[in-house]
């Protein structure tokens, strides 16, 4: 047991977000009046409310202990990398290439050792994706990697 | 159109072969994702959105709705066999369903869940038909202030009822409302919080937000989860047969659960998860031997399973007749309809009868299909639970990316999914509810528009929210809920103080 970090950090982050949003809205957008609200009114109020709520969540957490959740850093990195590879690589690697690459990266943190099943899975999923989205739904996407 | 004409008309529409196929596809897929722990109806509906662009909005709604209530059926399977909730709505079924399975009565528990789900759905359909007609007539009396107040009540109810930490719920709702402000302001044309990104002019993409918060975050949380490696036993058809004693015990819980689910499903802000929990605590309260609960009481399966199904159906009443989604999944449905250019509202029943009555008829057909299919297919669903998660999640990730991409054809949205997914995972770890964030996000623009209109009409006088009877009712109910949760928090703190002083 340690200090209640999830509530403390979560609350403070939300409070900071609220403060930034409120100030940004006050500075950049017209506030208007209650009768004729400008574009800044709603976000400014919400930002202030979020600031207050964030503090309400964070401050009591200072004096409280809570079990620590464990962040699966490896899984997070692999999953996000797979999505980014797919999103940014779609036009260079093609649908088949981007899918295979994303699947390979995504399987890295999987609890099962060995690489054969990973390669096989990449090929199967790539084939499935091409079948469903390109041939079945006729999405217009490049299929194969572009040669330089 | 009278109710009977409407139902006949709807049956005629929903029984067309191509509509029937999408209904079947929806319920089977829904059961599939419901059975698998870690993927819920939310992620499945997001995944299916791209496919709906190729079919009519009516068929799309019928299919997506099928996924939703199909998942309610499937969710019970993993809850009973592995003590892993297949969907959040079935979490409470683990309490007595799993002990039943340990006593060798897994088949009976599954039968109870299926039968209760079916009964709850039928009850929900009747309530939906009655309620939708009444709501769309009543909605003509609704003004901007009433809409704003009603949505406010929805948000307050969603963050307080059944929540252990209302402040965290409110924070998520507020963050959602704030994210809903991103994009071009419809009243003034000013670009808010876009930071020069043209991709943000239309706001944050709803599909990207839903996929990130649910799909990606769920995948990350489940990859290394040791609980996921459970193995379910094989089941024969014969083991499903209940005893007469079991049937006798199921009746009242189903009726109470259905009534409760229908009520909370139609109420904005509360939904099927909450109603299943409330039904369970009610059954335990009215039981003659409450100590049987937690040790395989069949009432603890029948009540909640009927409640979550009837709630899943009546939730469509406010969504379709008022255009106000009561829970995050309805918000996603509404988003799907808007992408198709359909704006639900009081005119829906008149203007698009095939959509409303077709959907109602498809509920009946879909639930019948589920009942007929699921009992013999139970063996297949159990076998599904044996597929290891690491063979599924890479494909889920790719499909999810393509689903997001297909909405607008922007790689920006895929990058956004990655960032939202990270945020969603951290929020889930810190026990902030991403579902409430999504609810706020969808309701945000609606609330703001109606709020501004209400104040414009009243010339800036806030009394408009107390002078109109409808608005006043919603505002007073919201205040009552707020006070109640404050009182509960105070009592809890006082109770905690006692424990410390006595210990």
Image: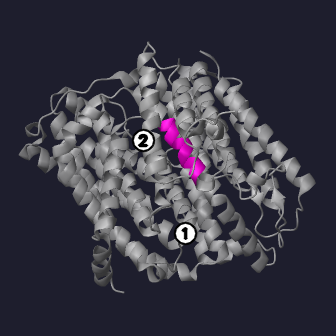
Q: Quadrant of residue B18?
A: bottom left
Question: Residue A63, position in %: x, y?
Answer: 69, 23
Q: Quadrant of residue A60?
A: top right
Q: Residues at marks 2 and 1, common chain? A: yes
The residue carrying pointer 2 sits among few (fewer than 14), some (14 to 19) or many (20 or more) residues within 10 Å by Cα, namely: many
Residue at the location (23% across, 57% down)?
A: B369
* Residue B174 appears in the picture as rendered: yes
Q: Residue furthest bottom?
A: B1
Question: Residue B381, position in %: x, y?
Answer: 26, 38
Residue at the location (48% across, 25% down)?
A: B223
- Image position of B453 with respect to B140: above or below: above
The residue carrying pointer 1 sits among few (fewer than 14), some (14 to 19) or many (20 or more) residues within 10 Å by Cα, namely: many
Left or right for A4, reference B71: right
Of B254 and B124, nearer the camera is B124
Question: Residue B91, position in %: x, y?
Answer: 38, 38
Which residue does the numbered mark 2 point to in the structure image?
B88
Q: Is B397 covered by the magenta stretch? A: yes
Q: Earlier in the sequence, mark 2 or mark 1?
A: 2
Of B489 and A43, nearer the camera is A43
Left or right for B56, reference B414: left
Of B319 and B93, nearer the camera is B319
Q: Which residues are magenta?
A: B396-406
Numbered mark located on residue B323 in the image: 1
- Mark 2 belongs to chain: B
């Amino acid at each position: 047991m340690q200090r209640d970090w999830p509530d403390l950090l979560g609350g403070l982050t939300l409070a900071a977000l609220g403060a930034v949003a409120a100030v940004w809205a006050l500075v950049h957008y017209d506030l208007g009046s209650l009768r004729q609200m400008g574009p800044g009114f709603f976000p400014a109020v919400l930002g202030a409310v979020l600031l207050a709520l964030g503090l309400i969540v964070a401050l009591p957490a200072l004096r409280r202990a809570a079990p620590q959740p464990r962040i699966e850093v490896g899984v997070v990195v692999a999953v996000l990398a797979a999505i980014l590879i797919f999103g940014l690589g779609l036009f260079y690697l093609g649908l088949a290439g981007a899918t295979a690459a994303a699947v390979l990266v995504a399987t890295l943190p999987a609890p099962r050792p060995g690489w054969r099943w990973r390669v096989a899975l990449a090929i199967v999923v790539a084939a499935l994706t091409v079948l469903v989205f390109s041939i079945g739904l006729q999405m217009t996407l490049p299929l194969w990697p572009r040669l330089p | 159109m009278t109710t009977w004409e409407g139902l006949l008309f709807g049956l005629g529409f929903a029984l067309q072969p191509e509509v029937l196929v999408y209904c079947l596809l929806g319920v089977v897929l829904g059961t599939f994702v419901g059975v698998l722990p870690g993927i819920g109806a939310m992620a499945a509906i997001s995944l299916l959105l791209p496919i709906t662009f190729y079919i009519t909005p009516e068929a799309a709604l019928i299919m997506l709705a099928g996924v939703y209530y199909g998942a309610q059926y499937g969710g019970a399977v993993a809850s009973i066999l592995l003590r892993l909730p297949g969907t959040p709505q079935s979490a409470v079924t683990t309490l007595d369903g799993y002990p039943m399975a340990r006593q060798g009565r897994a088949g009976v528990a599954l039968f109870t869940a299926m039968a209760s789900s079916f009964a709850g759905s039928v009850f929900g359909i009747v309530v939906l038909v009655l309620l939708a007609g009444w709501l769309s007539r009543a909605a003509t009396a609704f003004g901007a202030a009433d809409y704003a107040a009603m949505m406010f009540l929805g948000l307050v109810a969603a963050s307080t009822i059944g929540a252990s930490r209302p402040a965290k719920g409110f924070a998520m709702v507020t963050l959602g409302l704030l994210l809903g402000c991103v994009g071009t302001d419809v009243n003034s044309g000013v670009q808010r919080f876009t930071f020069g990104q043209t991709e943000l002019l239309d706001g944050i993409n709803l599909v990207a937000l839903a996929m990130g918060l649910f799909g990606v975050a769920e995948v990350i949380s489940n990859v290394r989860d040791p609980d996921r490696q459970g193995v379910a036993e094989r089941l024969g058809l014969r083991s499903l047969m209940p005893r007469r004693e079991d049937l006798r015990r199921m009746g009242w819980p189903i009726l109470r659960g259905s009534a409760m689910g229908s009520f909370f499903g139609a109420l904005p802000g509360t939904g099927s998860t909450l109603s299943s929990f409330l039904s369970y605590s009610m059954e335990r309260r009215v039981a003659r031997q409450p100590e049987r609960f937690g040790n395989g009481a069949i009432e603890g399966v029948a009540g909640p399973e009927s409640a979550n199904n009837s709630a899943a159906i009546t939730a469509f009443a406010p969504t379709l007749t008022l255009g106000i989604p009561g829970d995050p999944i309805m918000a996603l449905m509404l988003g799907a309809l808007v992408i198709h250019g359909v704006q639900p509202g009081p005119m829906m029943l008149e203007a698009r009868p095939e959509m409303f009555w077709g959907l109602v008829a498809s509920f009946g057909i879909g639930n019948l299909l589920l009942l007929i299919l699921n009992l013999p297919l139970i063996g297949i669903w159990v076998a599904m639970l044996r597929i290891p998660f690491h063979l599924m999640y890479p494909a889920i990730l790719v499909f999810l990316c393509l689903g997001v991409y297909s909405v607008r054809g922007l790689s920006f949205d895929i990058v956004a999914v990655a960032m939202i997914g990270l945020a969603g995972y951290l929020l889930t770890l810190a026990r902030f509810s991403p579902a409430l964030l999504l609810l706020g996000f969808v309701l945000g623009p609606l609330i703001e528009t109606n709020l501004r209109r209400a104040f414009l009409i009243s010339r800036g006088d806030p009394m408009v929210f107390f002078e109109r009877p409808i608005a006043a009712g919603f505002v007073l109910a919201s205040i009552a809920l707020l006070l109640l949760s404050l009182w509960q928090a105070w009592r809890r703190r006082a109770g905690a103080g006692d424990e410390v002083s006595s210990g």
